Image (cartoon, helix red, strand yellow):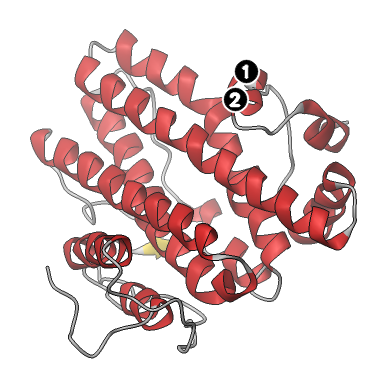
Amino acid sequence: MRLPDSIDSVGEACAHVLMTPDPVAKLMAARAVARNWRLGRLAHRFDAAMPDRPARPEKPELLPPNRMPKRGRIGSERARIAMLHALAHIEFVAIDLAFDLIGRFGGEFPPEFTDEWMRVGADEAMHFALLDRRLRQLGSHYGALPAHDGLWQAASETAHDALARLAIVPMVLEARALDITPATIERFEGAGDEASARMLRRIMTDEIRHVAAGTTWFRHATKRLGVDPANHYQILVKRHFRGSVKPPFNDSARRQAGLTREFYTSLAQ
């Protein structure tokens, strides 16, 4: 997919991804934007406003989290499809989260910030493509089931503050995925679905890098402000995260990402 010739800045390109509703078109746009940036075709200019909400396809139906149907035991193919669909929706929204982060806050950071988050955005597009392909192998597809509409809430809550966005999205939400994915992989393996388990292992490896990107740039920004990173993280999480930071924690994976225990253990007490 080629970007429209009129798009020549990072800001315009990120807005283009966010305003593309069709899932396949969105992942292709994400890949095209990341490639154009890598090839030097986009100016490091932030001249487009990011939308309050991204464009969304007609399906899946978006429901409040408390209205989502129960998935049941993962041993059944139906339950595995429901789990994979939920993960595909997370990755679909993650595409928008990555490009919104760049387009909304990239001007506050050096170009290396855009380098890193473009790679993250391309990863999220690839993850979505893998999950949708696996759903199709199982006779389903993204959009066949409802999905919950709580994921964008974190973006809305932190739309005014780059540090808050880094704290909540990569350093809370994606870090939580590091905690729970190993058990999910084990359940797929126990159900004999090695193809899905192998795919989730690959995605988790990338997610460690994404949490590391969030932690690295959070530390960069707090150093510039002259504040303690762990303490400031805790302040922002208490202020902006509506859920709870709770164990069990995958301390090993978090440590690989630079998110060490002094950041989060006190939040769980």
Q: Residue 67: horizontal and vertical position, in percent?
A: 49, 54
- In the image, 139 versus 131, the foreground residue is 131
- Residue 7 sits above or below residue 121 on the image: below
The residue that mark 1 highlights is 252
Q: Secondary structure at mark 1?
A: helix
Q: Which residue is mark 2?
A: 256
Q: Quadrant of the N terminus?
A: bottom left
Q: Left or right: where does residue 29 sit relative to residue 241?
A: left
Q: Say if mark 2 contacts mark 1, CB within 8 Å.
A: yes
Give the camera-side residue of 245 and 126. 126
Query: Based on the displayed image, in which of its 4 quarters is residue 264 positioned?
Result: top right
The label nearer to you, 2 versus 1, is 2
Left-right relation of 56 to 177: left
What residue is rendered at 23% in x and 56% in y? Answer: 143
Q: Is residue 193 visible?
A: no
Compare residues 159 and 256 and report the one nearer the observer.
Answer: 256
Q: Residue at x 52, y 81 (%)?
A: 52
Helix, strand, or loop for circle 2? helix
Residue 224 in view in this figure: yes
In the displayed image of the protein, which residue is found farthest to the front? 40
**Picture coordinates of residue 159, whole percent (x, y):** 63, 73
Q: Residue at x 78, y 27 (%)?
A: 261
Residue 113: percent from left, percent from top: 54, 59
Please indicate whether residue 142 sits to the left or right of residue 234 in the image: left
